[in-house]
Image (tube, rainbow, N blue to C red):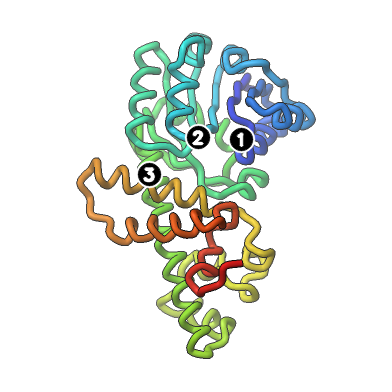
C-alpha cells in the first residue's frame, strides 16, 4: 500500500483516484468542487480540505489539472504543493499541458529535492474508469521505476518517453495525429454520402484497405459501422471537441517554439476551432463529421 495525495478529481482524475483506492492504496484527494470531493469520498477516498493537505498526506502526489497555468499555480504558488509535500515525495503530473511548463515545474521541483514526472494520459473518460489508460511519461528513469506500480493501478500501457517534458511531447504529437486522421476519415465519409456510397460499404472496404486507421475502425465517426463509437449515441463524448482543440493548440504552440512545419496540424486546429465556436465543443471530437458534412445539429 502506498500513501497517495491526489489533486484534481474531475472527469478524469476522479475515476483515476478511485482506481487507486480499489487497488488498496491510501488516497487523500482534493478538488475545488464539493461534488467531486463527495464522489471521491463515496468511492472510499479521504477528502482533503486543501491542496496542501492532500500533498502532505502522500509519499506520491498526483495532479490532474485543466491547463498549464493551473499546474504552475498548484505546484509553485505560495502555500502550494512544493511547499507542502513531504521530503522525498514523488510528484506525478498527469495533466495535458505545454512542454515548457512541464519542464519548468519539474526544474522547480528538482530545486526543492523532489523527483517529478510528467505523465499525461490517453484513453479518455472510459479508459480512466476502466483503468486502461496509456501513460506517456517524461522524467528520470529511477522516478519512472518508482512510479510504475502506482500508474499500473490506473492504466494498461505505461511508456517511459524520455527526460522531463517527453511525456507531454508524446501526448501532443499523438493527439495531433488523431485530430488529423479523424478529419480525414470524416471528409471521406462526407464525400461518400454525396456520391451515393453507403457508409457501411465504405467502412467494410476501407477497414481492410490502405485507409485503415484507429479513427475508422475503432471510433468510426458515422452511425452504424462501429456500435461502440460515440456516433451511435448522438456524439456524447468520450473525448470532447474542446479537449481536442486544446491539444491541437498545444501542438501548434510547440511547433512554433521548435520551428517545426505542421500545416495539417494547423488546419486541424482551425477546423476544430470553427466547430467549437459554433457551439459543438461539448460533443465528442468525432462529431466534426457533422460539421464537415454540413449538418449543424
Is 99 above or below relative to 107?
below
Label 2 element class? loop
Q: Quadrant of residue 187?
A: bottom left
Where is 2 relative to 291, above or below?
above
Q: Nearer the viewer, mark 3 or mark 1?
A: 3
Q: Can you give x and y, in whole percent of width and height, for residue 231 in the image? A: 62, 67
Q: Which numbered disc, 3 or 1, marks the residue that appears first in the sequence?
A: 1
Q: Earlier in the sequence, mark 1 or mark 2?
A: 1
Q: Are marks 1 and 2 in contact (CB under 8 Å)?
A: yes
Q: Position of residue 49 (x, y in %)?
A: 67, 16
Dividing the picture into quadrants, the one containing residue 129 is: top right
Check disc 2 and report the residue beneath it. Answer: 94
Residue 237 left/right relative to 148: right
Q: Secondary structure at mark 1?
A: helix
Residue that label 3 marks: 250
Residue 286 horizontal/vertical position (percent): 54, 63
Identify which residue is drawn at 64% across, 50% down.
Answer: 126
Does dot 3 land on a helix, a strand or a loop? Answer: helix
Amino acid at each position: 500500500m502506498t500513501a497517495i495525495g491526489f489533486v484534481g478529481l474531475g472527469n478524469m482524475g476522479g475515476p483515476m483516484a478511485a482506481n487507486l483506492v480499489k487497488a488498496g492504496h491510501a488516497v487523500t484527494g482534493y478538488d475545488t468542487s464539493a461534488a467531486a470531493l463527495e464522489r471521491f469520498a463515496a468511492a472510499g477516498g479521504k477528502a482533503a480540505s486543501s491542496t496542501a493537505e492532500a500533498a502532505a498526506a502522500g509519499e506520491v502526489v498526483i495532479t490532474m489539472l485543466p491547463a498549464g497555468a493551473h499546474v504552475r499555480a498548484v505546484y509553485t504558488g505560495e502555500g502550494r504543493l512544493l511547499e507542502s509535500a513531504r521530503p522525498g515525495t514523488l510528484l506525478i503530473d498527469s495533466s495535458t499541458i505545454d512542454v515548457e511548463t512541464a519542464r519548468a515545474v519539474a526544474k522547480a521541483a528538482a530545486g526543492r529535492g523532489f523527483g517529478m514526472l510528467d505523465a499525461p494520459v490517453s484513453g479518455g473518460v472510459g479508459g480512466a474508469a476502466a483503468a486502461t489508460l496509456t501513460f506517456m511519461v517524461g522524467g528520470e528513469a529511477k522516478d519512472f521505476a518508482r512510479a510504475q506500480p502506482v500508474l499500473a493501478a490506473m492504466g494498461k500501457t505505461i511508456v517511459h518517453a524520455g527526460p522531463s517534458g517527453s511525456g507531454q511531447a508524446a501526448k501532443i504529437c499523438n493527439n495531433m495525429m488523431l485530430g488529423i486522421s479523424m478529419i480525414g476519415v470524416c471528409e471521406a465519409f462526407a464525400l461518400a454520402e454525396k456520391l451515393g456510397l453507403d457508409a457501411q460499404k465504405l467502412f467494410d472496404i476501407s477497414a481492410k484497405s490502405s485507409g485503415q486507421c484507429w479513427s475508422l475502425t475503432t471510433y468510426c465517426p458515422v452511425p452504424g459501422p462501429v456500435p461502440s463509437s460515440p456516433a451511435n449515441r448522438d456524439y456524447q463524448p468520450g473525448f470532447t471537441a474542446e479537449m481536442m482543440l486544446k491539444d491541437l493548440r498545444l501542438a501548434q504552440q510547440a511547433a512554433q517554439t521548435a520551428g517545426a512545419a505542421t500545416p495539417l496540424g494547423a488546419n486541424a486546429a482551425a477546423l476544430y476551432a470553427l466547430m467549437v465556436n459554433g457551439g459543438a465543443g461539448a460533443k465528442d471530437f468525432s462529431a466534426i463529421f457533422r460539421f464537415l458534412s454540413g449538418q449543424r445539429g
